[in-house]
Structures are given as structure tokens and as C-alpha cells.
Image (spheres, grey):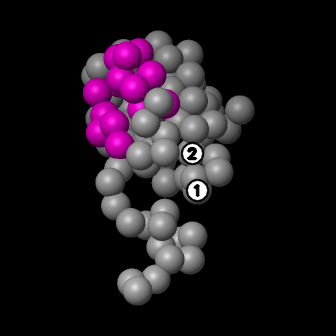
Amino acid sequence: MALDEVLAGIDPTLVALALDAPPTTAVAMAEALAAALQRHGHDPAALTVDFGLGAAEAGMALALRRSGFAGPALRADGRRVHEGGATEA
């Protein structure tokens, strides 16, 4: 898996990680990153990970919080609405 290869070469406690996945894959990508970090033995509480989850993925954000990831838990902005075709009107 590509995530395992990337994580093998870095100390994620020294960087802030951020996912910017589209809504259709946000939960799957968050699950994959969380699992890869834990497989490599990293303490979730020692990491700064923005999983890029919006309000629609609040359940996943809560599950990540319960497994020890500190957050930020949710991203509250209008990018997903805008990217979905919404306008100012």
C-alpha cells in the first residue's frame, strides 16, 4: 500500500498531516490513513492529522476521536458545496 511506503520514510510526529479527499472517498481515505498510522505504531494522540472530514462525515470524525486522534475533527467551510456546483445566489 502506498500509505505504508510514505509513512515508512517519515516521522509523522514532526509534521502536520492533512487529507483533502473528495466527499465520495473522504471516509475511506480517513480510515486508510488512520489504519496505516496505527500499523506503524504511531500514537494517535501524538499526531496532528486533519482528516478533511465535513459535517456529513461527523460519525467518522467521532470514531477517529474515540480512537485517540486529536483532530481537527471536522472542517467547516463551503468548499464541498462550491465544488458540488453551488453558487452565491
Is residue 13 something that shows in the picture? Answer: no
Counting from the top left corner in percent of width and height, residue 29 is at: 59, 39
Q: Label 2: state its secondary structure.
A: helix
What type is the residue that disc 2 sits on?
Ala
Position of 69 with respect to 63 (left or right) is left
Q: Nearer the viewer, residue 79 or 86?
A: 86
Question: Which residue matches tag 1?
Answer: 22
Outermost residue, bottom side: 89
**Magenta run includes residue 61:** yes
- The image quadrant of residue 33 is top right
Q: What segment is highlighted magenta in the picture?
A: 60-74
Q: Is residue 1 above or below residue 16?
A: above
- The image quadrant of residue 15 is top left
What type is the residue that disc 1 sits on?
Pro
Q: Is residue 31 above or below residue 51?
A: above
Which residue is rendered at x = 43% and y = 67% of the image?
79
Counting from the top left corner in percent of width and height, residue 66 is at: 37, 16
